[in-house]
Image (cartoon, rainbow, N blue to C red):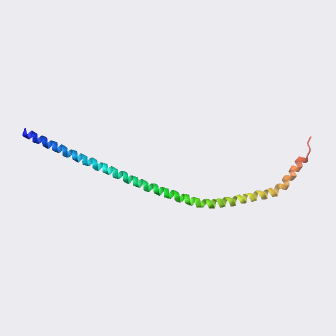
Amino acid sequence: MEANKGGIQQLLAAEQDAQHIVNAARNAKMARLRQAKEEAEKEIAEYRAQVEHEFQKKVAESSGDSGANVKRLEIETDAKINHLKNEAARISHDVVQMLLKNVTTVRN
């Protein structure tokens, strides 16, 4: 009976040791998962900041270009307006003559 009692005590002690080992492993795993999550969040924040910086840089570059684009569009628009005025001046005499001819002609 004493041998059984000692064996049972050994078995209980071994089970308790195993439980401590399992708990330590579980705690280590949870700590590593927390650490991995924090590292991933840090990497995500750095990437997000980098992408935001690049975006702001492109916005600033395109804003600078928009001033040049506005100036170019103003020049092109002025050139087109001048071209239309010249064309209108060139053909206005012919248009007036055609209108007078059609208005003054009497048809039965």
Q: In this view, does 99 lie to the left or right of 23?
A: right
Q: Where is residue 58 in the image (x, y as percent from the top left)?
A: 54, 58
Q: In this view, does 12 lie above or below 58?
A: above
Q: Which of 85 and 49 is in front in this view?
A: 49
Which residue sits at x=15%, y=42%?
11
Q: Which residue lies furthest to the top in this view?
A: 1
Q: Where is residue 26 in the image (x, y as percent from the top left)?
A: 27, 47
Mark count: 0
Q: Position of residue 41 (x, y in %)?
A: 40, 52
Q: Nearer the viewer, residue 9 or 58?
A: 9
Q: Is residue 82 left or right of residue 104?
A: left
Q: Which of 62 and 8 is in front in this view?
A: 8
Which residue sits at x=43%, y=54%?
45
Q: Is residue 27 left or right of residue 9?
A: right
Using the rendered view, name the quadrant where residue 70 is placed. Answer: bottom right
Q: Which of 73 and 92 is in front in this view?
A: 73
Locate the C terminus and report the quarter of the image it occupies: top right
Locate the N terminus and report the quarter of the image it occupies: top left
Q: Position of residue 51 (x, y in %)?
A: 48, 56
Using the rendered view, name the quadrant where residue 6 is placed. Answer: top left
Q: In this view, does 80 lie to the left or right of 7?
A: right
